[in-house]
Image (spheres, grey):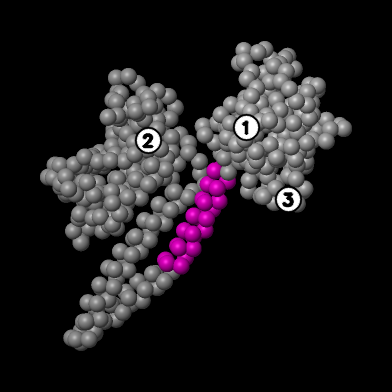
Amino acid sequence: MTGSSASQQVPADVAVSPGASRVAGLVLDTATPLDQSFALIAEHFLSLPRVEIVTAALTTFAPDNDAGWINLGQRAWVTEWVRPGSACSILPPPDAGPEAALTMPWVSQRAREAVLTIDDIDRLPAEADQDRKEIAGCGIRSMVVRAQITDGVMFGSLALGSTQVGPWPLGGVADFRLIHAALTARIALEQARRSVAEAVTTGAQTRETHQHFFASIGHELRTPLTAIIGYTEMLVEAADDLQGDAFAASVSNDGRIILRAGEQLMAVLEDLLSAGRALAGADLREGVAVDAAVADVLHWHRTAARAGDIRLSSNLPAGQQVWAHPAGFRLVVANLVGNAVVHNVPGGSVEVSSQTLIGESGEPRLRVIVRDTGPGLTHAQLSSAFEPFVRFAGASVKGTGLGLSLSRSIAERDGGTIGAESTAGAGSVFWVELPLHGGQPSPPDVDVVA
C-alpha cells in the first residue's frame, strides 16, 4: 500500500547534538578542506545507529580530490560512505555515463524545497513510483535528503539512507538540518571562490590575447602604412621637381591625397594601439596622483599649445589620488587636453581642475575637469560627441574621431564615467570621474552626483 504518510514531519525546534555543532563549525571553517568536510559529515552520521549510507553530489564543480567520486558526464559528481556490512549503494559502475544517474523526480522536486524525511519508501504515493523503484534498487528503504540550493542555484545534494523503516530519530534529523545548512554555505563560498579564480584566469588570458593582437596589428599594419607613406612622399617630391609636366602635376596632386589618407589611417591606428595597450595592460589599478599625471599631460601638449597661442594651466590640490590604471588615466586626460588645445581659438586657454563628489552608493569620487575657451558644441553635437569617428572640426584640424570613444571605454573599465557640457560659442567642459583613492573627500568640497 502507498500513501503520502511516508513523508515524516519533524518539528523545527528539535535540539541538535554537540557533535553536529562541532562538525558544522569545522565545515564552515575555510581552513578545513572541502574533501575533509565531507568525510567529517559522513563520519558523524555513520555513528548514528539508523544511518547506513551517506551520499553526496556536486553539480557545479568537480571535487579537488576525485578519488571515490564518480563523474556522471556533465550532470554531477557523486560519492558515498557506507557502513561496513550494509548492502546499500547508490554508485553506478566507474565507467557509467550520465544515463546512470538516479532521476527520482518526485523526491528531487520536494528535496529542493526542504529537508525530505521518508520513513518507508513502500508508502510513497503512486506518483512516486519511479522514485520507489530507483531507491529500492540501491537497497535503501528510508532516507533523509535535501538539495543544496542558494539563490536558485543548485550546487548538489546530501542524503542519508537506511535499510530500516519507521520514523527517523528527531535528533538525527535536526543534526542533518544544521550540517546540511553549513555544507550549503560552504559549497556556495567555494563556488564563489572558484568563479573569482576562473574570472581572474580568464581576464589574464584575455589580456595576453589582447597584447598579442595589438602587437600583431602594430606590425602588420604600421609596416605597410609606413612604406606607403614613405614611397608616396618620394613620388610627390619627384613629381614636384618636374616643373611644367602635366602628368607630374597630376601625380603630385594625387600623391598628396594619398599622403593625407595614409596619415589619417596611421593616426587611427596609433589611437587604437594606444587605447588597446591601456585596456589590455597588465598593470593593476592603483592610487594615481592626479596632479602629477596632469602635469605630465600638460607637458606633452605644451609645444602644440604654444604654436596655437593657447595658455595651459592646472588648478589641482596636491595629494588627490584616483583609483585607476596609471597608463589608462593619463591617456584619457591626454585625449581631453589634446582636444581642448586642438579645438581652441588663438589666445584661448585650457584649464584643468578637480571636484570631489559622493557617488550614488555613497562612495567618494573625483572628477577631473578640462575647461576650454573654444567654439563649443551644439546640443545635437554634444549628444554624439562620444560616438566613434564623430568629428566636428574642419579638415585642416587633425584628428580621428576616436579619442573620446576610446576614453569612455578606458574610464568605464576603471569604474568611472566621462561626460561633457558645452555651449556653442562659449567653450566646452569635458570631465572624467573615477573612484577617489586614499581617504574621504573634505565636506566643504563635496557635491552629490545626480
- Marks 1 and 2, the one that precedes in the sequence: 1
From where the camera sits, is residue 35 visible? no
Dot 3 amino acid type = Ala
* Separation of residues labelled 1 and 3 (CA atoms): 30 Å
Q: Residue at x 38, y 69 (%)?
A: 225
Q: What SS does tag 1 mark? A: loop
Please tell me whether residue 212 belongs to the stretch shown in magenta.
yes
Q: Give left or right: position of 364 versus 105.
A: left
Reply above or below: 122 against 407.
Answer: above
The residue sitting at 84% across, 33% down in the picture is: 86
Q: Pointer 1: what residue?
A: 125
Identify the residue at the far left of this view: 425
State the residue position of label 3: 96
Q: Secondary structure at mark 3?
A: loop
Instruction: Give the x, y percent position of residue 253.
Output: 22, 77
Q: Is residue 160 above or below residue 262?
A: above
Label 2: few (<14), some or many (≥20) within 10 Å? many
Name the residue type under label 1.
Pro
Provide the secondary structure element on which disc 2 rests: strand
